[in-house]
Every structure is written in structure tokens, then in C-alpha cells.
Image (cartoon, grey):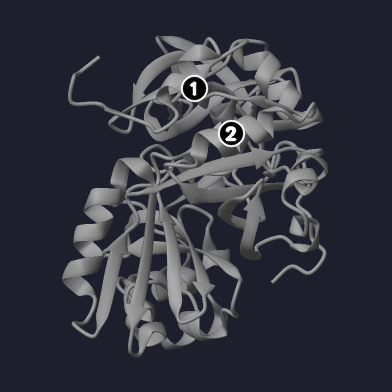
């Protein structure tokens, strides 16, 4: 591993628990502890603790904040109430996706969580395009944990009383055994769960308190990836990039109704045209025949063997006990039930388009925004 890779605040905590560490997004990060399959199943059945401190945590504050952010994001920021989260997209001038992110109103500021591999570029883009009346702060002293699974509330409410009152996509300030934390009810597995922002100086205590709960085990990047794939959730740099629009990526839910009509965000003209006329390609879910997974980079081919699309995520689903994938295919082939041929290392695989998520979401909807 490169010496340039940074360490997480919990680096030694992971190593002391037997984590296998790998380079990811410029950091040494745990890929697994007991094994990806076991960790995946534990999260689906109980509660898994993920260290996502590599992600970028930002605050943006200043005058006319909603309008400033609406010039960069296709969301109706004026409708976001205090303590509510919105999934949104940072777009380039051609409507391509620079990053996907979570934005939360916290009083008179917005709190943004952006992807770890793109955070420096995101910050530079935001600083260049936000008006001088708005200030961006990169919260470099904060760590971030994600607690995911059907028993996450049961475990967390024991040490952070009151979190059980949060609805999906809401957040608030809490104390975990005396550690100040901002906790939101969201996540990247399709399960109920929470994301927990604490000071890097306090994160070891928070992680210890969480893993002292019988329902909780630490989970690595490997299971995080297989969980989000089963949940049909795209990963930036794989399923999303600057050449892909929200319409192609099947993320039109992130384009609010008013913004679709009015525009006024980067790439709006192209996106409005795609909403009206459709796109050439679409992101779809695939159920792959047989037992062998088809991985990112495999090609979608036509009857003559010509490349007409590409797999962007693929793997074996522990819950379905079958291979699944996400791919970009011609829009005419995007309907569920369509038969698809894939080519990987000169071998052909048969698949069919299926709705996503592959495994049903189990978010806590009470009180949702």
C-alpha cells in the first residue's frame, strides 16, 4: 500500500479486531473481519457497524443559502425542513453526475455528506461556484459511523435514548454515553439504520459502546458493497460518473417537481429534454442465470456479439443465493423481463432485466420526510 494513504481515526481499533485492511478512497480501510458472507448476513439479521469516516462531512452557511444550493443541486432546498435529509446530486454543466450526496438542514446551515473518493473535487467545485456570501467548512475533525440492520434501533436506543423517535431521513443531536453525536436515520444497505457523526477524538469510545451491544458487530467494505448491490443502490465511480445523467441512472426521484419544470441547475436543459424524450441508455437490475457472478466491466452484447452496454456492479447475492448485477443497457431493452446476453472473459452469460431493489428495502418509514 502507498504511504500516501491516510489512516482512519479507528485504524488501530479495526486492526485489533482482526480486520483485513485494504486501500480505498485514499485510506487504509477494513474490507472484512470474519468474512464477507457472514458479515452480510449478520447485517441483514441483526446490526452491523461500518466505519465511513473517509466520507466528506461539510457544512454550508450564509445568506440566501437555499437559492445558492439550488443553483448547484436539482432539489427543492426551500422545502427541506429542519432536521430533514434529502438525497441529491452535484451536476456538471452537461447534466453529468459529479457526485451523489445527502443534504440535511441543521438550523441555519446545511450539512452535506459526500463520497470519500470525490470529496476534494466536490469541495473545490462548491467553493468555486458558491457565492461569496456563503461559507463552506470541511469538518475534518469529525468521524462518521453507520449502524445498519433490523436491530439497529434496539441497540442504539439503549445508549442514545430518543433515537427511536427519528423517522427515515430525519436527524438530530444526541448523546452516546456522554459523547455528543449528530444522528440521522438513513443508510446504504436497504435496512433500517443510522449514520452517526462524532468527533474523531470520541469515535473510539462511541465504537466501543456500540459493539458492546450484543446485536452489533463491526462490518467491512466487502459486505457494505454486497449489501448496497442487493438494495439496488448505485456506487459513485462505478454506476455513476460525470458522463451519466440522473435520467440515465434511474435517479429521477432526486429531481424535485418544481426544479424539473423550472430548471436553473447545471445541465437542466439536457435533463429536461431527456425527461421528455427519453434516453439512449438506462441503468437496470439484472438477474444472472447460473451461479457464477458477472462483475463490473462485463459487456452487454447483441445477437451479433457487438457491445451495446456495460455491467457497472455485479456479485453474488447472499440473501438470494444467486448472482445479480446492475448495467447500462439500451433504453429499448430496459423493461423488466427483457432477456440480456453478457460477455465476460470470452464467456457468455444469460440474464434478464428485473426491478430493483433485488432485496426489499426495510426503512423505518414512520415520520418520514
**Depth check, front residue: 187 or 159:** 159
Q: CA distance from mark 1 to mark 2?
A: 9 Å
In the image, residue 245 above or below residue 7 = below
Crowding at dot 2, Cα within 10 Å, few <14 / some 14-19 / many 20+, comes out as some
Picture quadrant of residue 172: bottom right
Q: Which mark is residue 325?
A: none
- Which residue matches tag 2? 207
Toward the front, the furthest residue is 178
Quadrant of the rendering where the N terminus is positioned: top left
Q: Secondary structure at mark 2?
A: helix
In the image, residue 27 above or below residue 117 = above
**Label whose residue precedes the other's in the sequence (1 or 2):** 1
* Residue pictured at 78% horizontal, 48% vertical: 157
Q: Badges 1 and 2: C-beta atoms under 8 Å apart?
A: yes
* Residue pictured at 62% horizontal, 50% vertical: 178
Crowding at dot 1, Cα within 10 Å, few <14 / some 14-19 / many 20+, comes out as some
Q: Is residue 60 visible?
A: yes
The x and y percentages for residue 351 are 62, 26
- Which residue matches tag 1? 13
Q: Is residue 96 left or right of residue 82?
A: left
* Residue pictured at 50% horizontal, 39% vertical: 203
The x and y percentages for residue 214 are 79, 26
* Residue pictured at 58% horizontal, 34% vertical: 207
Amino acid at each position: 500500500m502507498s504511504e500516501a494513504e491516510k489512516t482512519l481515526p479507528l485504524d488501530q481499533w479495526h486492526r485489533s479486531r482482526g480486520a483485513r485492511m485494504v486501500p480505498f478512497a485514499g485510506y487504509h480501510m477494513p474490507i472484512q473481519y470474519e468474512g464477507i458472507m457472514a458479515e452480510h448476513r449478520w447485517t441483514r439479521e441483526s446490526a452491523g457497524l461500518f466505519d465511513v469516516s473517509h466520507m466528506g462531512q461539510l457544512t454550508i452557511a450564509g445568506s440566501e443559502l437555499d437559492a445558492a444550493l439550488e443553483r448547484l443541486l436539482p432539489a427543492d432546498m426551500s422545502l427541506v425542513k429542519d432536521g430533514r435529509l434529502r438525497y441529491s446530486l452535484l451536476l456538471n454543466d452537461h447534466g453529468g453526475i459529479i457526485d451523489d450526496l445527502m443534504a440535511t438542514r441543521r438550523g441555519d446551515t446545511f450539512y452535506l455528506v459526500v463520497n470519500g473518493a470525490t470529496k476534494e473535487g466536490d469541495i473545490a467545485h462548491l467553493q468555486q461556484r458558491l457565492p461569496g456570501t456563503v461559507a463552506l467548512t470541511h469538518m475534518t475533525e469529525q468521524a462518521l459511523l453507520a449502524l445498519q440492520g433490523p436491530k439497529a434501533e434496539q441497540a442504539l436506543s439503549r445508549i442514545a435514548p430518543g433515537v427511536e423517535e427519528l423517522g427515515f431521513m430525519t436527524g438530530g443531536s444526541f448523546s452516546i454515553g456522554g459523547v455528543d453525536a449528530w444522528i440521522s436515520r438513513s443508510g446504504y444497505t436497504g435496512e433500517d439504520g443510522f449514520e452517526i457523526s462524532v468527533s474523531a477524538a470520541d469515535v473510539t469510545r462511541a465504537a466501543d459502546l456500540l459493539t458492546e451491544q450484543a446485536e452489533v458487530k463491526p462490518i467491512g467494505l466487502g459486505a457494505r458493497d454486497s449489501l448496497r448491490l442487493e438494495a439496488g443502490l448505485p456506487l459513485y465511480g462505478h454506476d455513476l460518473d460525470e458522463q451519466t445523467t440522473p435520467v440515465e441512472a434511474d435517479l429521477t426521484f432526486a429531481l424535485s417537481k418544481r426544479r424539473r419544470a423550472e430548471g436553473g441547475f447545471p445541465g437542466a436543459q439536457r435533463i429536461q429534454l431527456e425527461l421528455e424524450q427519453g434516453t439512449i441508455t438506462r441503468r437496470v437490475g439484472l438477474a444472472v442465470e447460473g451461479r457464477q457472478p458477472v462483475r463490473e466491466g462485463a459487456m452487454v452484447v447483441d445477437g451479433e456479439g457487438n457491445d451495446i452496454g456495460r455491467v457497472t456492479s455485479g456479485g453474488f447475492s447472499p440473501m438470494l443465493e444467486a448472482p445479480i448485477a446492475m448495467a447500462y443497457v439500451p433504453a429499448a431493452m430496459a423493461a423488466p423481463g427483457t432477456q440480456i446476453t453478457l460477455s465476460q472473459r470470452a464467456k457468455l452469460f444469460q440474464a434478464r432485466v428485473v426491478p430493483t431493489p433485488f432485496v426489499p428495502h426495510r426503512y423505518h418509514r414512520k415520520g418520514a420526510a
